[in-house]
Image (cartoon, rainbow, N blue to C red):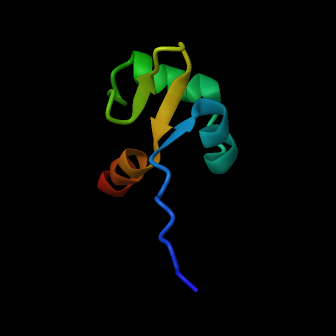
Amino acid sequence: MEIRAVPAIKWVKLNRFCQLTGITEMAVRKKRHEGKWNEQIVKCAKDGMLYVNIEEYQKWIEQS
């Protein structure tokens, strides 16, 4: 049997991020608007949806 590595998910939709962390969408949007979270953490895709980079969020938490 061949074992394949599953790639880690780097970006998740805002609503999924909120489900995982308990942080509200309003709080994420505020951090983005105030410049506390840059495009390395929160990004608006071409379809207008906001996505959060889990890896960068964790780095931000660890640096706090």
Q: Quadrant of the N terminus?
A: bottom right
Residue 52, image x and y in percent? 48, 36
Q: Residue furthest right?
A: 19
When the figure is inspected, residue 17 is found, relative to residue 46, above or below; the finding is below
**Total numbered badges shown on the rendered structure:** 0
Residue 4, image x and y in percent? 50, 72
Residue 15, image x and y in percent? 66, 33
Residue at point 46% right, 14% down? 46
Residue at point 53% right, 13% down? 48
When the figure is inspected, residue 55 is found, relative to residue 15, above or below; the finding is below
Between 1 and 5, the one lying in front of the other is: 1
What is the quadrant of residue 17 in the picture? top right
When the figure is inspected, residue 31 is found, relative to residue 19, above or below; the finding is above
Residue 20, image x and y in percent? 65, 49
Residue at point 41% right, 53% down? 58
Q: Residue furthest bottom?
A: 1
Q: Residue furthest front?
A: 1
Residue at point 38% right, 36% down? 41
